[in-house]
Amino acid sequence: MSVRRKGPKATAIRVATYVLLLAVAVVVIFPFLVAVTTSFKRNTDIFTYPPSLVPRAAVTVPAEQVGLEGDPVPVYTFPARDDRSGQWALVDNDASLAEFRPLDDLERIIVLAVTDGDKTGATITIDGEAEDVFLIDDGGTQIEAYRSRLTSGGLFVSVGNPDDTVLDLVNFATPVQEFGPRFENFTEVLAERDPETNGKGVGRSLTNTVLVTMLVVLGQIITSILGGYAFARVQFKGRSTLFMMYLGSVMIPFVVLIIPLFQLMLQVNWRDNLVALIIPFAFSAYGTFLMRQFFLGIPAEIEEAALLDGASRSTILWKVMVPLARPAIATLATFGFLYAWNSFFWPLVIINSGNPDNAVLSLTLSTLGGRSSTDTNLVFAGAILAMTPPILVFLFAQRYFVENSASSGLK
Amino acid sequence: MRFRDRGPREPRVTVATGIRMVTIWHLFGVAAGVTSMLLASRTGDDELPVAIKLLMQVFSIVVTVAHVVAAYGTFRGLRRARTVSLVTNYLLFVVAGSALLHQVGAFTAIGKFGTGLNKAFLPFLVIVVGLLWVLVAGQLLSNRPHATGPTALRKAGWGLAAIAAVWFVIAADPSGMLSTLADRITQPLTIGTAIVTVGAGMATRFMWQRRVAVHFGTSAAEEQTLSGLAFLSPNLIGFMFFFAGPLLFSLVVSFFEWKTTGTGRTFVGIDNYVRAMSLDISSADAANAGNEVLKSGYQVLMHLDWFGQNWVLGARDVEFWISLRNIFIFLVLAVPASVLPALVLSSILASRLPGMKVFRAIYFVPSVAGVIGVAIIWGQLFQSTVGWINYIILRAGEILPFVDPPADGHPWVSSNSTALLSMVVVFAWMNFGFNTVLYLAGHQSIPKELYEAADIDGANVWQVFRRITVPQLRNTTFYVLITTSILALQLFDIVWILSTPEPGGPNNATTTPVLALYEEAFQGNNQGYASALAWVLFLIIFGFTFAQFRQQKDGATSGGVS
């Protein structure tokens, strides 16, 4: 729709158009942005509210600065406490604490050490239970309170003044954070499967996916070139019948083939082996069709000239037709790549013994990111690794891809 | 153009001798066929399973007959004998070759090769880089045929790949693989298969020659057919073995009660189909009457209230019917959600304003990114406490008065009411970009004169869209609707990852027919019944596909998409 009018109204429409396009683009890009940033986060950072696009790391101070030895300690602030400004280092997150509730304000919680507070000897009934009444120190004044809970919490030391310490629940404190991407997510998810090092074995699956994809694409290209050439250029008996069969096969959804293919793989003992992902998919009716269409478009004179030169049919095919058919082969390779790289249902069915050495990327990722997933940051690192190659291939091969998906309509 | 075909060579074997040898080869074939028939029919302890036995017997008979005909024909020099001999030998070569590869474990070694590749990924990458280099250099070469530089570059690429290949072999350490290979090769059966493969291959090669064709007087048409089938054969064999054969087998299995393991294979006729489709309805006094008002074997599917009377609808396979209901709800929501935005956006992108190609590329990305990754991302976005969807709705509620966010975070995928809707969102997000590109192709066939005329008439944007774009894209719309529907009917991956607490959950709210089929076949081990489900689903999908083919046929005459 080429509306190339001028004037303020046309300009307004054009602005509105771009706003709409940009809005949709944001809807498309935003989830990917979330994925990329999540893949650089720490796991705890993913599950904080509100959600954020910035990978953050806790700010720490050297242990020596707060009069200790050992690992650096994380820094917190108490924004809700007016009387406690500045930064506080958490030196012990397992200190024994007691929660006291003043008798004149039962909603308030005062956190003190277990040893703090003196029993007055009196008791008070709270929710039907008798509780001891304590005298505790509340900012210099002694007030009556009862001990509602014994718990463990944090011992904080003021970063500026190591003598100033305070006990409080860690939940009441806000960690001080800075921008800090965690690159180890990628090395850990790729590393060999090992609970000790938290390795997830995605590297092995990546290798398998690369191998499977490569061989499927190679197989599809070779068989499609040969079949497409036969359909396009060789007059043989039964050609039209066979071609109709190929065309018709596109209508059959893969779910119908799942069970018999599974049985076949059992018979030849290919279950749980990468070969089951390769050989059955090295043939493509769509690819054959694509190559045939392209070969039909090559002028017959070129072939006839070569035939007169005494070349055999296979020489003509590989030396004349194939170099001319590069765009079609590129299209086929792109489609084959995306199909093989992303395929999930068949691997799920046939690679089913749970041996991670035979799994492909989509399968490993689905187990890793499934319902019992724990390391979300690593899952996202794996997802990024899985999504990047097909997206890159698409961006580089866009020309072939967009044009041909439009004309053939095959997904 | 010149071809570096191998020059004329002095044939080592004369035609007459060669044919005599082929005849003898075929006689051996007859003997082998009879032997294999006897082996297949053996009874006793090592009797073969029925299916394999039958297959081997049929195969043996075919092989024997073919060899008898070929032996007789080549001996008498009959015209058709060459064709029979060629086809027999070629197929024998393929079968024996595959069997040989199978026996030495070459196929399953691909899986083990993954281990080697994993150990030697870096040298592998260098090989790929080297080969890509060759390709790129080759490209340069073809652009500038007289330049000398690229040839050297190309050689450098080959050299790099070769060095990396050596490095690869060392790093991948295939010694274990090679020793197993040596072990297996020395088995007598393997040696026998190898002899058959080589013999059949040599016989094929001999009979294929031009001078042999002349000798037998093969007609040009026959020669064409042979060469056509030869080119098609790798493709056709795969097509038969991994598509046509399994398709028929699937139909057969659907009439059996069929287990993967054990001997539970009984013919049950159309029972599987009857079980899948059976419904029963009964009136009930109480509003929530249970299974007792239904025929035995039926379970409650849903309760209905018609004209003040309570009805109970039951089915034998409740889960399948629920999955059908789900998939139709999904279809009704997801298809418009992935087609309507495509229609509107494509109309804008077709305007050729600056930047349109960038937007087109961006919109396309979700459809290539891979469904598992996408589902994982959306799982996090839908998260009830820290997910972005709830956060954005909450923020929107602060600005926009009509947005009313729920007090606590809404659990999108674990709530009965929104689980399926969540799948719709992901599906539409993944597919609208692809549909946009399909529509863009449709736009190319709209005559520009229509827009110019509308422009002169002073039509506004909406009128142009409504009166020109939409009607002109009717055929494309139909095509896009059908392909999207076929895709939607096979929904599985998104549900497999996203639904919770188990696939299809909560409470079967997201169960789909493919999921039901998967569970029957691979978790319940009811492969016969699952095959019947597959064919029911296929018939539904076929309805859509058939409509599309009809439309395309009509479209060809009225200038639609092709």
Image (cartoon, rainbow, N blue to C red):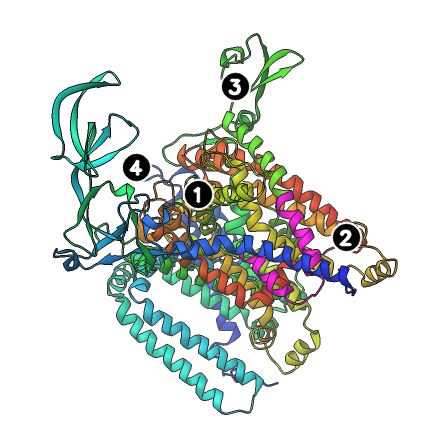
Residue B225 visible in image: no
Give the CA distance from mark 1 to mark 4: 47 Å
User: Measured along the vertical axis of the image, is residue B273 above or below residue B109?
Assistant: above
Residue corresponding to mark 3: B300
Asked whether B364 or A256 is in front, the reply is: B364
Residue corresponding to mark 1: B497
Asked whether A35 or A93 is in front, the reply is: A93
Numbered range of the magenta stretch: B336-365
Residue corresponding to mark 2: B465
Could you classify mark 2 by the number of other residues whose Cα lies within 10 Å: few (under 14), some (14-19), or many (20 or more)?
some
Task: Tell me the element at label 2.
Answer: helix
Chain of the residue displaying label 3 = B
Chain of the residue displaying label 2 = B
Asked whether B2 or A4 is in front, the reply is: A4
Give the CA distance from mark 1 to mark 2: 39 Å
Chain of the residue displaying label 1 = B
Task: Tell me the element at label 1.
Answer: helix
Depth-wise, is mark 3 or mark 1 nearer the camera?
Answer: 1
Depth-wise, is mark 2 or mark 3 nearer the camera?
Answer: 2
